[in-house]
Amino acid sequence: MKFFIDTANLSDIQEAYDLGVLDGVTTNPSLMAKEGIFGHDNVMAHYKKICEIVDGDISAEVIATTFDEIVREGEALADLHPNIVVKVPMIREGIKAIRYFSEKGIKTNCTLVFSAGQALLAAKAGATYVSPFVGRLDDVSTNGLSLIEQIVQIYDNYGYQTEVLAASVRHVMHLVQCAEIGADVVTCPLSVILGLLKHPLTDSGLATFLADHAKGNK
């Protein structure tokens, strides 16, 4: 499984990268705004900074909703760096654009996916990644993990090359269960990645070992 970090915060990206387990980054306009990054030139410059930290796929989201504008915006993003993946919303014009990008050799991430049917369309159009939102489905009393499992099964049935990127992952168990189901990628905040380190028995065991070592050196 690939680990992506879902943020535009450079410090968090650097910390995850320094841990040695980071494979890529996902961002969106909301995450950019959270970091106080506004305006086309500032956003584009920030994507370049992210690409300087991480040698992996960096999802950069378009804000357009018509085919021509999605293509124009997506091509400009793809020109920034070879690792840029154009993040396109799951809408009619988005699917058309994903097919266009696929034929041009531009990697895509189909985002805001909430059903298996949507994921099937994305794969048919040639998306590199499809991003079902686990946490947001849980928010409306729907099992987001069941959707991940369903998409993985459908893609396995037909040998689709589109990778299942579990998004809106909010806690460690989400991540672990996505791994059990067979998601290709998980994207989450730094706190979730660091949460994998934690177990009380590890902490207590280490404390005992260090205490015993200290006794032996008195």
Image: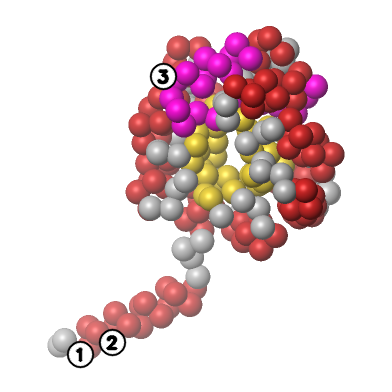
The crowd level at tag 3 (other Cα within 10 Å; few <14, some 14-19, many 20+) is few
Q: Residue 216 shows which numbered tag? A: 1
Q: Is residue 177 above or below residue 127?
A: below
The crowd level at tag 2 (other Cα within 10 Å; few <14, some 14-19, many 20+) is few
Whether residue 94 is visible, yes or no, is: no
Tell me if label 1 and label 3 are in contact, CB under 8 Å. Answer: no
Q: Amino acid at mark 2?
A: Asp
Q: Amino acid at mark 3?
A: Ala
Q: Secondary structure at mark 3?
A: helix
Q: Tell whether 47 sits left or right of 125.
A: left
The magenta segment is 71-92
Relative image position of residue 213 (x, y in whole percent) = 24, 84
Q: Residue 45 shows which numbered tag? A: 3
Viewer-nearest of labels 2 and 3?
A: 3
User: Marks 1 and 3, how far apart in space?
Assistant: 55 Å
Nearer to me, 16 or 37 = 16
**Picture residue at 50% right of the left edge, 70% below the top:** 199
Tell me if label 2 and label 1 are in contact, CB under 8 Å. Answer: yes
Q: Secondary structure at mark 1?
A: helix
Picture quarter with the N terminus: bottom right
**Dot placed on the residue nearer the N-terminal end, 2 or 3:** 3
The crowd level at tag 1 (other Cα within 10 Å; few <14, some 14-19, many 20+) is few
**Picture residue at 29% right of the left edge, 79% below the top:** 210
**Dot placed on the residue nearer the N-terminal end, 1 or 3:** 3
